[in-house]
Image (cartoon, grey):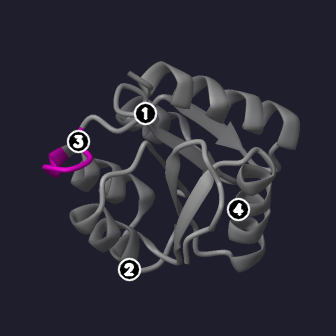
Amino acid sequence: MRSQGLTTGSVLVIEDDESQRLLITQILEAARIGVVSASDGAAGIQKCENQQFDLVITDIQMPRMRGNEVISAIRSSKMNKSTPIVVVSGTLDKDLITQISNQVSKIFVKPISPKEFSESIHSLLAQKAP
């Protein structure tokens, strides 16, 4: 699903929880950011193989492919290997944070603050802009 008429960037949201995916999408659309969504890690990787994104947002705990596997796959991809990645997750342990911290731009723990989230995403998109 891709949002129409939005002008700031193209963001892939990979989130298995439909209500969280909808919340993140609404926050981004309210900030005039284009959104493509995937309901699990495998679907997100497939989208990354076919489209260049300005930013990827992923959960960690998902079926079919965990978020840390998604991050590794994106970092190995041709189209999105340098794309900033933001993690939004309800569960993060210290070992996992250590494992992914040098591969991601920002980590949010659910529940997210819409204002802080939106500001962070805009800041990351502005850094990527030419």
* Residue 105 x %, y %: 48, 28
Question: Residue 44: x and y, percent?
Answer: 39, 68
Which residue is at the front of the view, 106 or 8?
8
Foreground label between 2 and 3: 3
**Alpha carbon separation for disc pair 2 and 1:** 21 Å
Report helix, strand or loop for mark 4. helix
Label 3: state its secondary structure.
Answer: loop
The location of residue 14, given as percent across then percent down, is 51, 64
The answer for how far apart the CA atoms under marks 2 and 3 are is 21 Å
**How far, Cα to Cα, is label 2 from label 4?**
22 Å
Distance CA(mark 1)–CA(mark 3): 11 Å
- Give how far apart the Cα atoms at labels 4 and 1 are: 20 Å
Mark 4 vs 1, N-terminal side: 4
* Amino acid type, label 3: Lys
For marks 1 and 3, give the one nearer the viewer.
3
78 falls in the magenta region: yes
Please report the bounds of the magenta region as a residue range. 76-81
Along the line of sight, the residue nearer the viewer: 63 or 95? 63
Residue drawn at x 43%, y 42% is: 54
Q: Amino acid at mark 4?
A: Thr
User: N-terminal of the two: label 1 or label 3?
Assistant: 3
Which amino acid type is shown beneath numbered disc 2?
A: Arg
Disc number for residue 64: 2
| Residue linked to disc 1 | 104
Q: Give the labeled residue for mark 3.
A: 81
Mark 2 or mark 1: whose residue is earlier in sequence? 2
- Above or below: residue 102 compared with residue 54: above
Closest to the observer: 100 or 125? 125
* Amino acid on which disc 1 is placed: Val
Residue located beneath label 4 in the image: 25
